[in-house]
């Protein structure tokens, strides 16, 4: 149980996808989320239904934190959750999960696209020997946990699976800093995930991203914000960077031909 309490920053050499040391300090955020500013009227209704259905209890896999003497909840973000949590949290740790890689294979018809022109957002796919960098949020207050879960059930409603994984903060770590971190995953099972788009060439994915825009804004902004957020803690994700470069190339060519 002491493993879940490792929150001190460590100096770590910087491999291709490893954060700089300064980014590993835990961060705190107690700013109250204004839910009415985050959701449409339809999503507010879904929030009420989600809260009444799950009540926060069944979905939460918590760990006892001896330091605070509370049951705590951990959430791992590898996409927009990195730069926009949307819920109250006590700590934010930079680190990674093992055995997965981040891919732009999930269709988005609710945030970064429409049913006619779906955007593409990231999901995780199993990848032996690989790691996926992101951030883990610790939520210790019971009310904050229930509000966060209700919020995430609406925000991540097109992600059909939850996994509880080990979270590491050092590239050579064999012992997790935190166990049972909750992560949302969009699976390739079309029966349960009708919005899954799957693999395609970098050029094809880039063209889809350029075309798509939804209630949360242009799909390209999501891509560029993800690239920037990862680079801020030293992570050079090849898939994300190659895709961002291709989007910029296409946009630049279109600008030249239009003039």
Image (cartoon, rainbow, N blue to C red):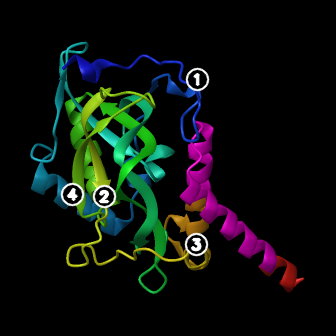
- The residue where tag 4 is placed is 48
Decide which of 90, 183 is in the foreground and name it: 183
Q: Residues within 10 Å of mark 2 (few under 14, many from 20)?
A: some
Residue 89 pos. (x, y %): 36, 32
- 258 in relation to 231, above or below: below
Spatial CA span between label 2 and label 3:
21 Å
Mark whose residue sits in front, 3 or 1: 3
Q: Is residue 46 above or below residue 176?
A: below
Is disc 3 in contact with disc 1, using a CB cutoff of under 8 Å?
no
Q: Are marks 4 and 2 in contact (CB under 8 Å)?
A: no
Q: Which residue is mark 2?
A: 185
Give the crowd class for mark 1: few <14, some 14-19, many >=20 residues within 10 Å: few
Callout in the foreground (2, 3): 3
* Whether residue 253 is visible: yes
Residue 12, magenta (yes or no): no
Give the answer, above or below, for where 182 lies relative to 45.
above
Tell whether position 250 is magenta: yes
What mark, if any, has residue 202 been given in the picture?
Answer: 3
Q: Earlier in the sequence, mark 2 or mark 3?
A: 2
Residue tagged 1: 22
Residue 44 occupies which quadrant of the picture? bottom left
- Separation (CA) of disc 3 from disc 4: 39 Å
Q: Earlier in the sequence, mark 4 or mark 2?
A: 4
Could you give the CA–CA distance between mark 3 and mark 1, rounded to whole angstroms? 33 Å
* Quarter that holds the N terminus: top left
Please report the residue visible at 34 percent of the width from the left and 19 percent of the height from the top.
6
Label 2 to label 1, Cα distance in Å?
A: 29 Å
Q: Nearer the viewer, mark 3 or mark 4?
A: 3
Q: Secondary structure at mark 3?
A: helix
The earlier-in-sequence mark between 3 and 4 is 4
Q: Earlier in the sequence, mark 3 or mark 1?
A: 1
Q: Is residue 117 left or right of residue 157?
A: right
């Amino acid at each position: 149980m002491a493993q879940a309490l490792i929150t001190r920053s460590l100096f770590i050499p910087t491999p291709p996808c490893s954060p700089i040391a300064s980014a590993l300090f835990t961060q705190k955020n107690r700013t109250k989320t204004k839910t009415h500013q985050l959701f449409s009227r339809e999503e507010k209704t879904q929030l009420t239904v989600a809260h009444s259905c799950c009540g926060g209890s069944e979905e939460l896999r918590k760990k006892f934190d001896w330091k605070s003497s509370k049951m705590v909840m951990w959430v791992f973000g590898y996409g927009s959750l990195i730069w926009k949590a949307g819920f109250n949290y006590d700590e934010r740790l930079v680190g990674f999960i093992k055995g997965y890689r981040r891919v732009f294979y999930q269709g988005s018809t609710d945030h970064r696209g429409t049913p006619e022109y779906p955007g593409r957002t990231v999901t995780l796919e199993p990848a032996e020997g690989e790691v996926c960098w992101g951030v883990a949020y610790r939520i210790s207050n019971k009310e904050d946990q229930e509000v966060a879960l209700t919020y995430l059930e609406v925000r991540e409603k097109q992600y059909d699976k939850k996994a509880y994984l080990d979270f590491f903060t050092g590239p050579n770590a064999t012992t997790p800093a935190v166990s049972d971190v909750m992560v949302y995953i969009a699976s390739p099972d079309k029966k349960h995930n009708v919005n899954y788009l799957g693999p395609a060439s970098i050029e094809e994915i880039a063209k889809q991203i350029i075309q798509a825009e939804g209630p949360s804004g242009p799909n390209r902004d999501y891509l560029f914000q993800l690239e920037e957020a990862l680079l801020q803690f030293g992570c050079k994700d090849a898939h994300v960077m190659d895709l961002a470069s291709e989007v910029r190339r296409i946009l630049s060519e279109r600008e030249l031909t239009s003039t």
